[in-house]
Amino acid sequence: MMECMTLLGFGACAPDSEFRASLPFPAGDIDRGVMPAALRRRASQAMLMAFSAADVACKRAGRPPSGLPSVFASVAGEIQVTDRLCIELAKPDGVVSPTAFHNSVHNTTAGYWGIAHHCTRPSTALAAGHDTFAMALLEAWCQLACHGGELLLVCYDERWPAYLAPPMGAPAFASAMVLGAGSVAGGLASIGRPQPGLSARLPDNLAALAAHQPAAAIPLLAQVAAAGKNQEIPVSMAFGGWRVSLISYTFEVTDEEQ
Amino acid sequence: MTGTAIISPVAITAYQCVSAAGDDTEALWRSLNSNQTCLKPLQLFELPFTTVVGEITSPLPDIRPELRAYDCRNAKVALRALNQGGFRTAVEQAMARHGAGRVGLVLGTSTSGIYDSEAAYVHFLQHGQMPGDFNFTRRHTAQATAEFLRLELGLRGPCHAISTACSSSAKALGVGQRLIAADVCDAVLVAGVDTLCRLTLHGFHSLQLVSPEPCRPMDIKRCGINIGEAAALLLLERMAVDNAHHSRLLAVGESSDAHHMSAPHPEGAGAAAAMRRALALAGKEPGQVDYINLHATATPLNDLAEAKAVACVFADTPPCSGVKGLLGHTLGAAGAVGAIVSLLALERGLLPGTCGLDDADPQCACPVLAAPRPGVYPRLIVSNAFGFGGNNASILLGIGEPR
């Protein structure tokens, strides 16, 4: 039985500069350069954020994307495209664009990630409301426990149209992690199996930052960046909650990432 | 992919399916035997083009008042399947056996409750706001019907949705197997649920992939898909002495085409990789497979790519067929529907036919059955589901021990 998974590298993308500045770990703006030019023109905010975070995670882990299976997790996926399609469908003379339609599926970002990186490894797209990050970690755990190796986990949500579920759907945020089965040399942290139930209360500033999906990854990344001791970290803010045990090692921010 | 570790099989202790064929697996079984299409003109809403669909036309049950926030067509179709043929009792028994916290739920869906969102958007355009009972995260987003089923049953284990277009519920079966193999759960309810909506009908029409007539999988005159809807539920449980006679989920092989968002790899490379991966994960050889339930959507490109993939993996290709001419393409539910069709074939003895196939495409070089073959008992079945984004999943199912 696998006893832990190892965090080999992570990245984060927060397009809102104020939100980005409030994060207790390095995060970047959208980096359009990480997406092939042919895909960039129609890329959604979700896709750009997920690619930006995943690119940093793979580089920091020193792993080429083409070799990693992937788990893409998001509550609402391509909601900006889907919203525009729903508006068209509600009009008597609305027009549905074929590209918008195939770019509205939940696994759009996962699909383009594979296309952009010529990655033929399995890729999945998952959703679980407030538990989305927790369930993505659990799916990553199960894949690593059953198949070994390493994988890429990306958890993201773009900004939702304001009328859908206020106050949810903001700020837009993506986090990405490269995870390995068991103990792997050179890792940033060791993460235990996600467990149901609440952990100790978070400091107020972190609790406020992590209140909504997709920011549920924030406490875990904050703890990794702080190189803290063995701790129980919440990975879902939902009622009942999910948590992981985390042992973080050293974490150094290099100059180029500042 | 050298030295693939074998994954433990899981028992499939109950299953149930509501589709255009009717309200339970008995109706599906009759339909597989008669091989007469269930595709008809759409009744649910008006369309500005001609096609036929696999529609569930029986009245759907009401969602109980406490769970009204989840009320949508997708949840209602799922509830109908849950209440058929003792399936709910089987889940309750699994909860009693293992504890509610050890029973998980994984839903595969592509459009979730979007049929109901479409009506909400009409209200939005007229009034500038969503209707008062609109609930985005409990009806529209992918996990909505998963949460509904979990609350309806009182399950306490992990719960989420896989949404990878038309491979969604095939991949959900893989998630369920892994949850048991990794000892997170002892049982997992895997649901494939997708319902008809304007988005998919207009969307596939815009891609020029919708057939005006009943579709013709693997036929030389095939010209596109018909869309269907279904709820297909399967209860996976850890293997034990008292469930050894049940059919087994041996593995789900997954791969990515890394080629195009809406067109398959022209040589079917991703589809072939998924089938090979399923066999490797189960420690089986291609020669042991004795029936393939094809994805066979009836678009010119999809069927050709899948036929090439099958010919590439299987030197001596077993009989193949596809059921989308009976039920339509049930999108995110198609993987779970395919699994149930395969379980009926294993347990009751039938190689299904391919409704709509008259004149086999000579370019599709695999032995596709047009008519069903009753009385034939396959022992090991591959069932395919491929989706947008080049997302591929092949399910491998095997018979249980004799009673």
Image (tube, coloured by chain):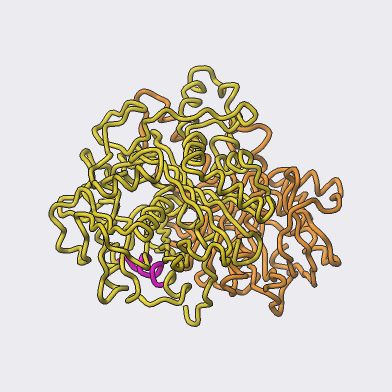
- Report which quarter residue B215 is drawn in: top left
Most extreme residue toward the top, as rendered?
B127
Q: Colour of chain B?
A: yellow
Give A62 or B393, whichever is nearer the viewer.
Answer: B393
Whole-percent x, y for residue B139 in the image: 55, 35
- Report which quarter residue B36 is drawn in: top left
Magenta region includes residue B83: no
Whole-percent x, y for residue B77 in the image: 47, 36
Give A97 or A182, whichever is nearer the viewer.
Answer: A182
Name the side, left or right, on which B270 lies relative to A172. left
Name the quarter where the C terminus of chain A is drawn.
Answer: bottom right
Name the side, left or right, on which B353 lies relative to B126. left
Residue at x 67% of width, y 45% of height: A130
Q: Which residues are magenta?
A: B268-276
Most extreme residue toward the left, as rendered?
B359
Name the quarter where the N terminus of chain A is drawn.
Answer: bottom right
Most extreme residue toward the front, as rendered?
B403
Give A63 or B123, whichever is nearer the viewer.
Answer: B123
Q: Is residue B278 above or below residue B87?
A: below
Q: Is residue A143 above or below residue B71?
A: below
Whole-percent x, y for residue B189 in the image: 55, 51
Q: Colour of chain A?
A: orange
